[in-house]
Amino acid sequence: MARYIFITGGVVSSLGKGLMAASLAALLQARGYKVRIRKFDPYLNVDPGTMSPYQHGEVYVTDDGAETDLDLGHYERFTGVSAHQGDNITSGRIYQDIIAKERRGDYLGATVQVVPHVTDEIKAFALAGQDDHDFILCEIGGTVGDIEGLPFMEAIRQLRNELEPWQTLSVHVTLVPYIAAAGELKTKPTQHSVRELASLGIKPDVLLCRAEHPIPDTERRKIAQFCNVRQEAVIPALDASSIYSVPLQYHGEGLDAEVLRAFGITDAPEPDLSRWYDVVDRHSNPEGEVTIGVVGKYVGLQDAYKSLNEALVHGGMAHRVKVNIKWIDAEVFEGDDADIAAKLEPMHAILVPGGFGERGSEGKIAAVRFARERKVPFLGICLGMQMACIEAARSAGHSKASSTEFGETDEPVVGIITEWMTEEGLQTREAGGDLGGTMRLGAYDAKLAANSHVSSIYGGTTKISERHRHRYEVNSAYIDPLEKQGLIFSGMSPDGLLPEIVERPDHPWFVGVQFHPELKSKPFDPHPLFAGFVGAALEQARLV
């Protein structure tokens, strides 16, 4: 039976629980253990699919079509283990399931309550799908003391009582702030946080203490004494030079060793961290640099493009170069051509990412036009590919070319997908339907044209599988007129109905994809599209 590690956070949010969970999982994995990570989100949304990127950051999509928290991206990038629907649960989904059961009469007239009905659902979620995993890490979103998080804390408390003593562990991530005026670190916030956790019936076994300054042994001893843990279980977590050095840093502080000790495991093999040393070396010691302009609409919050940012870094690692990302707001980018040129000329490559709505679309189209005319390497993702098709149509004389997403148009180059085929059968949608969970979501196959540029990027294959998240699609009626203008549809869905990839053979590197390749990129396995894109940017840098 799997061992469970429950991860909570205290004092303040944004301490890096997700990164800590991913790093610990990677360390256990490096010792030969099979791991899985899950995220419990206390908010009442069923999933983050309809939440603003400014509120929640990006929506991460799994192979099986779940819209999930961005922390699952960390989990996949650090472990290489594909997440699925059962790895992210929200209060909203739990309550939705409970109400559906109550309406069916499944509870046989019982009064439905937080305890036991809500907590039982949380426990069932935690215990499901153990398979042959050695460790399952469960991260609880939010901060200890939050009202909405109380049912999850109660479920953890119950699980720790119900499972074997050797089977569960509590790791609490906390903050040890530095007060500059006093010139010292303060342990009191950590003490209060642990006391709050203890009041809920949960005793932490390991404390991960985030700090900006080294924590002296005297302070570690003090934390251990007042928080009722071993001094060795007080793990300092200082700011790291990059997220990819965090696993090595935590290993150096003894996090994985202390976790194994708490489980009574003394004969664990030493970790093989060679791939992490290689990743850190590639990231820390670049042999060149490129500048890539990302023309998006959510550039005010980098978490909105978290996977994209990391995928570009991975592409840089593939060539041992540093990628300087310049975030350009597509909305303020809709000026005259001279202004556009001034902003984009310093870039070695241009990327137009996904998004929703009309805001900033003309700026994205202008960026595509600049990349096409100036022969600058270009990558369009999801909406970015659609903008490339609209730009191509306009340059071919269809001046009113647009997307039905932006309103009525006489030239609907992009329109809503009304139907598509899945393993479950034909999926149908209409414009006025629900927004949540109704897009074309998850992994779908695509056929690549033999001898195409994109096929060579993928190593010569003619079949790929990539993750999607979109409601609108390029209108196949425009394929022939666009191909006559030099935009080749080199990737299609297996049934030949949905365009997946476009490219320009007359351009050094011009690719648009309907899917989201950034979701499958790993630091130790960069996605071929991003490796190719950064390689093209490097070639461009040598030319200028």
Image (cartoon, rainbow, N blue to C red):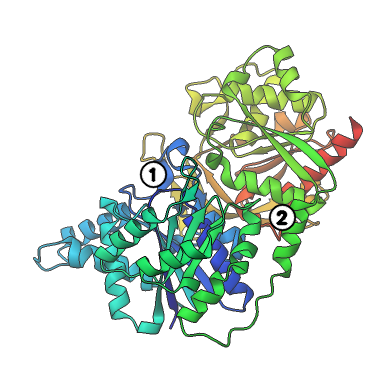
- Residue 338's disc number: none
Instruction: Return the residue at label 2.
Output: 526
Q: Secondary structure at mark 1?
A: loop
Depth order, front residue of 282/266: 266
Horizontally, residue 276 falls left or right of residue 24, namely right
Residue at 74 percent across and 49 percent down: it is 315
Q: Quadrant of the C terminus?
A: top right
The residue depicted at 71 percent of the width and 28 percent of the height is: 481
Could you give the CA–CA distance between mark 1 and mark 2, rounded to whole angstroms?
A: 30 Å
293 vs 107: above or below: above
Q: Quadrant of residue 269?
A: bottom right
x then y, percent, for residue 246 = 61, 59
Residue 46 visible in rendering: yes
x and y, in percent, of residue 506 in the image: 85, 33
* Residue appearing at x 29%, y 54% in the figure: 145
Secondary structure under the numbered disc 2 in the rendered image = loop
Amino acid tagged 1: Gly
Q: Which mark is residue 436?
A: 1
Up-down relation of residue 227 to residue 193 (above or below) = below
Q: Nearer the viewer, residue 488 or 525?
A: 525
Residue at (54% x, 31% y) in the render:
300
Residue 472 falls left or right of residue 55: right
Q: Amino acid at mark 2?
A: Pro
> How many marks overall?
2
Q: Is residue 61 left or right of residue 534?
A: left
